[in-house]
Image (cartoon, grey):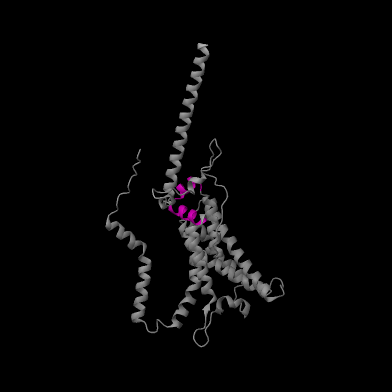
C-alpha cells in the first residue's frame, strides 16, 4: 500500500521576494552605509578609522547582545544605563580598598569584576522576577530600576567622580593584542570580548535548548507554556544574563504547565523538544515553531483518547465472550 504524502503548496514569487527583502534589509542598509562612506568620506578605509570605530562600538554591541535576548522573549529593558552605572561605581570602590583592604592589586581587580557582574545579574534577576511574578509589562517593570539605579550609583559614590589610574584594571578597555611593530597597534581587548560574546549568543540562540526556548516564548508565549517551556524561569535568566552580558546554556527545571503524565509515566515535555523528520529523513524545521508543537500535543492527546476508547471496548468484548462461555458450560 503506497502512502501519499501531501505536498506543500508553492508560495508566490512576490511573497518570497518580500520576505527575503525584510530578512536582509538590515544587512543591506549596513552595506549601503559602508559604500556611501567609501565614496564620500576621506580616509574611511584607513586602519585608524577602523580602529576608532571598533573601539567606540564595542561597549554598545556588548550591551546589545543582552538586549537581543530580552527583545527575543518579547520584552524590553530600560534600566541598562542605570545598572551599568551601579556596576561601574562598585568596581573602583572595591579595588581602591575603600571598603576592605584586599592586599594584592590583581586579586582586588578580580574580586571587583566578579562582584560587579554578580550585582548586575542580581538586579537583572529582580527585573525578571518582578515581570513574571506580578505580570507587569517589561517597559513598566524595568522603569523602576531605571529611576532608582541612578540614585543608588550616586549614593555609592557620594555624587562625585572616582578618579584612578590602575593599569591592571584599565587593561580591559585600553589593552591590545596581536600588535605589529610600526604597522598596527593591535586589536583592542574589548573588541575581542565583543566578538566572543556575539559568537556565543548566536550559537546559543541557534543550537542550544535555552535559545530555542527564548525564540519560542517570543513567538507565542502561551503556546510555549502549553508545550512545556518554563516561561517564568527562562525570562528571569534572560534578564539576569542581560545584566551580566554573558550568554550560557542552561537546562531549566521541570515545567509547571504541560507536563502531565499518562498511565505509562511518560511526560509530554518531549513534544516541545523532538524534531520530526520529513520524507527524506531530514529534520523538519517547521517543528521548531511553538504553534506546531502545540498542534502535535493536541494530536498526541487525541490519539491517547482513541487508544483508551479502543482498549476499553476490546476489554468489554473480552468480558462478554468469557461470560458467554461460562453460560454455555
- Tell whether position 241 is magenta: no
Residue drawn at x 42%, y 44% as measured from the top left: 295
Q: Camera-side residue: 180 or 4?
A: 4
Residue 141 picture location, percent across and down? 51, 57
Q: Camera-side residue: 85 or 176?
A: 176
- The answer to whether residue 139 shows anywhere in this view is no
Residue drawn at x 44%, y 45% as measured from the top left: 294
Residue 64 against residue 312 in the figure, above or below = below
Residue 69 against residue 253 in the figure, above or below = below
Residue 139 picture location, percent across and down? 47, 58
- Tell whether position 226 is magenta: yes
Q: Which residue lies furthest to the front in this view?
A: 1
Q: Which residue lies furthest to the bottom in this view?
A: 182
Q: How many marks?
A: 0
Q: In this view, does 25 lie to the left or right of 246?
A: left
Residue drawn at x 48%, y 31% as measured from the top left: 308
Residue drawn at x 50%, y 25% as measured from the top left: 315
Report the magenta residues as a range.
Answer: 210-228
Residue 57 picture location, percent across and down? 47, 73
Amino acid at each position: 500500500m503506497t502512502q501519499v504524502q501531501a505536498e506543500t503548496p508553492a508560495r508566490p514569487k512576490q511573497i518570497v521576494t518580500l520576505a527575503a527583502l525584510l530578512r536582509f534589509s538590515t544587512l543591506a542598509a549596513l552595506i549601503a552605509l559602508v559604500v556611501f562612506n567609501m565614496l564620500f568620506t576621506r580616509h574611511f578605509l584607513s586602519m585608524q578609522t577602523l580602529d576608532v570605530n571598533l573601539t567606540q562600538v564595542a561597549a554598545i554591541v556588548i550591551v546589545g547582545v543582552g538586549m537581543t535576548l530580552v527583545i527575543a522573549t518579547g520584552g524590553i529593558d530600560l534600566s541598562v544605563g542605570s545598572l551599568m552605572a551601579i556596576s561601574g561605581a562598585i568596581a573602583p570602590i572595591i579595588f581602591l580598598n575603600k571598603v576592605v583592604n584586599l592586599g594584592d592589586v590583581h586579586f582586588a581587580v578580580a574580586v571587583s569584576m566578579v562582584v560587579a557582574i554578580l550585582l548586575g545579574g542580581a538586579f537583572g534577576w529582580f527585573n525578571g522576577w518582578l515581570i513574571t511574578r506580578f505580570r507587569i509589562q517589561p517597559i513598566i517593570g524595568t522603569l523602576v530600576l531605571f529611576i532608582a539605579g541612578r540614585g543608588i550609583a550616586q549614593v555609592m559614590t557620594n555624587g562625585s567622580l572616582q578618579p584612578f589610574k590602575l593599569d591592571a584594571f584599565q587593561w580591559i578597555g585600553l589593552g591590545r593584542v596581536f600588535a605589529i611593530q610600526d604597522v598596527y597597534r593591535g586589536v583592542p581587548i574589548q573588541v575581542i570580548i565583543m566578538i566572543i560574546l556575539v559568537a556565543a549568543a548566536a550559537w546559543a540562540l541557534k543550537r542550544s535548548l535555552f535559545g530555542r526556548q527564548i525564540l519560542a516564548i517570543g513567538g507565542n508565549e502561551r503556546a510555549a507554556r502549553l508545550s512545556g517551556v518554563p516561561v517564568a524561569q527562562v525570562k528571569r535568566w534572560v534578564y539576569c544574563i542581560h545584566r551580566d552580558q554573558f550568554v550560557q546554556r542552561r537546562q531549566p527545571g521541570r515545567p509547571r504547565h504541560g507536563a502531565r503524565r499518562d498511565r505509562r509515566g511518560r511526560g509530554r515535555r518531549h513534544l516541545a523538544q523532538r524534531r520530526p523528520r520529513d520524507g527524506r529523513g531530514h529534520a523538519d524545521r517547521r517543528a521548531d515553531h511553538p504553534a506546531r508543537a502545540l498542534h502535535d500535543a493536541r494530536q498526541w492527546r487525541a490519539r491517547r483518547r482513541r487508544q483508551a476508547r479502543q482498549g476499553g471496548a476490546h476489554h468489554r468484548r473480552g468480558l462478554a465472550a468469557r461470560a458467554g462461555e461460562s453460560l454455555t458450560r
